[in-house]
Amino acid sequence: MQLPEDQLRAGHIPADLYRQIPPGTDVRRVVIVQQAPRSYKGPIVLTLVIAAGSVAVLLVIAFVVQVVAAAAVAVLSVTGGLSYTINRASKTRKGH
């Protein structure tokens, strides 16, 4: 029994805890409560929610920027400030 947890499981009271018990107390009726081990489920879920939220915000920002850019190109092309041409070259050969 090297660890304090082993002593508590076996029903032994470690010396440092024994000194804290008031005199005259029946040690057979003493209950030692250990703190539960820490749960990491909450912080992990919080991290995943933050990551998913960040990705969602970035996707929304990218979509809004795309819509604004398309609207700006449409407005500028209508007003004559910007024009672009799509030239599709013919791939068929004549007179072969």
Image (spheres, grey):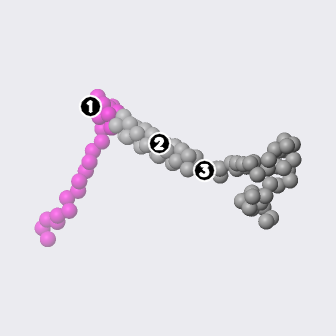
Question: Which residue is depicted at the point 30% across and 42% down?
Answer: 84
- Outermost residue to the left: 95
Give the Cα distance between marks 1 and 2: 38 Å
- Labels 3 and 2: the sequence-earlier one: 3
Q: Residue at x 79, y 50 (%)?
A: 27
Calculate the distance from the C-alpha at mark 3 to the C-alpha at mark 1.
61 Å
Q: Which of label 3 and label 1 is nearer to you?
A: 3
Label for residue 53? 2
Whether residue 31 is visible: yes
In reply to whether residue 74 is colored magenta, the answer given is yes
Mark 1–mark 2 contact, CB under 8 Å?
no
Position of residue 80 in the picture relative to residue 11 (left or right)? left
Residue for badge 1: 78
Q: Depth check: give the residue in front, 28 or 54.
A: 28
Where is residue 87 drawn, in percent x and y?
25, 50
Q: Nearer the viewer, residue 13 or 70?
A: 13
Kind of residue sitting beneath label 2: Gly
63 relative position to 5: left or right: left
Which residue is at 80% across, 54% downward? 13
Depth check: 61 or 50 in front? 50
Q: Which residues are magenta?
A: 69-96
Question: Compared to 35, does 81 lie above or below?
Answer: above
Q: Amino acid at mark 1?
A: Val
